[in-house]
Amino acid sequence: MTADYSAIRPGTDLPSYARELVRMHDAVIGGGRSGLQPRPLVARSWSRVLDVGLDPDAQNPRDPLPFADVLARRRASPLSLVIDDLRQTICSVADASQFLMVVTDADGIILWREGASRVRLRADVLGFEEGAEWTEELVGTNAIGTALAEASPVQLFSAEHFEAGQHPWYCTAAPVHDPRTGELLGIVDVSGPAMSLHPAIIALVETAVRLAETQLWRRHELRLERLRAEAAPLLAAVDGPLLLVDDHGWVAHTSGVAVQPRIAVPQEQRPLTVPGLGLCLPEPVPHGWLVRPTGPSARIEMHLDLTGTPTLVVSGAREGWRTALSARHAEILRLLHGAGPTGMSAAALSQALHGDSEHLVAVRAEVSRLRRVVGGVVESQPYRLSPGVSLRVTTAQPS
């Protein structure tokens, strides 16, 4: 992150600038002319919000979630692991009585809010409260919603907000990502009365986000360390190449094979192909999985039954199992079966499924979802069935 998204320049006269922004807001959104033009980020956001049809002079509906739903989202959010660190970083500064710290989930729903009671009361009037969704589509241009839309840090001052009711505020927000996967976890925001905006707010938010991501990574490392320690007696008794991974496929220990830091998510009774190990059947251990080769002679036999609802029947995986498939997943398996060992590129799969080679993202997402259903029996680059897997396809006879 960099500080080039600041809404003000050093030495800006905040009251005078706020009045200029109000005149600009009214002129530009009203379709008129203005000597002062919105920053590109603000102009993009206003354009998106106007396309949605929000009213700049109204307080558009907030409809906050029931608090029980907020609590459920808190429990599900990885940010619950670092909320105390965020509080300590942001709310311990000398002028914390002048602003609110707000933390949302990836949907823009406010899960936590901290700050002085007088600032919280002003925010309540605005609907800036726990359980409210602060996306652009619902409340117009604001740092939380615009940070989500732009996938970047945002600072807004006064009438850069779309709704007139938000003009007395500034807000500074930055996304927080899972340091392992890059997945968006939520937004950290600091908001307060517009005339109290200080240039150091950006550094405060950036520091808090960096600390949260660092702490999340450290917690990940500690979980892998604990998994290694708990599995140590088992590992000492097992010969041959193997992996010890957590429930999300992150590698805690490796023996006899070099692999990437993460493999496909293991599932019991679901075959899994791991580069360097070949076909494996994950074995559950406390808090993770032991992943070992099935052996050179072991094979997984699959039967794709297309005579009715697509169904996959798998044998050779200890007890065997069956699962219903979507029509799209069944079609992908049928195509890969027909392609044989040479497999298919993402572009070729896109052509077969969508009639063109432009749907690469959709194809990769579908294959990823297929792997979660049937296990890691599909290899990539190119996409193909794993060498230890055989597939038989039964289709309905023509009438």
Image (cartoon, rainbow, N blue to C red):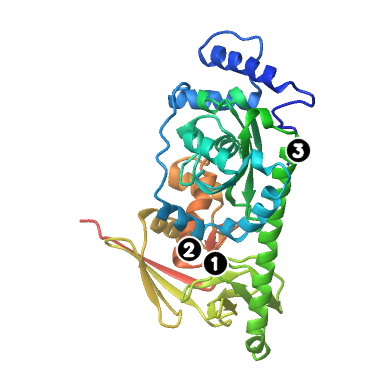
| Real-space CA distance between mark 3 and mark 1, rounded to the nearest whole angstrom | 42 Å
Mark 1 element type: loop
Quarter of the image with the N terminus is: top right
Quarter of the image with the C terminus is: bottom left
Q: Amino acid at mark 1?
A: Val
In the rendered view, does 309 fall on the left or right side of 227? left
The quarter of the picture where residue 309 lies is bottom left
Percent of width and height locating residue 91: 67, 48
Mark 1 = which residue? Answer: 265
Q: Are marks 1 and 2 in contact (CB under 8 Å)?
A: yes
| Real-space CA distance between mark 2 and mark 3, rounded to the nearest whole angstrom | 45 Å
Mark 3 = which residue? Answer: 200
Mark 2 = which residue? Answer: 372
Q: Nearer the viewer, residue 103 or 343?
A: 103
Percent of width and height locating residue 99: 63, 39
Whichever of labels 1 and 2 marks the residue nearer the N terminus, that label is 1
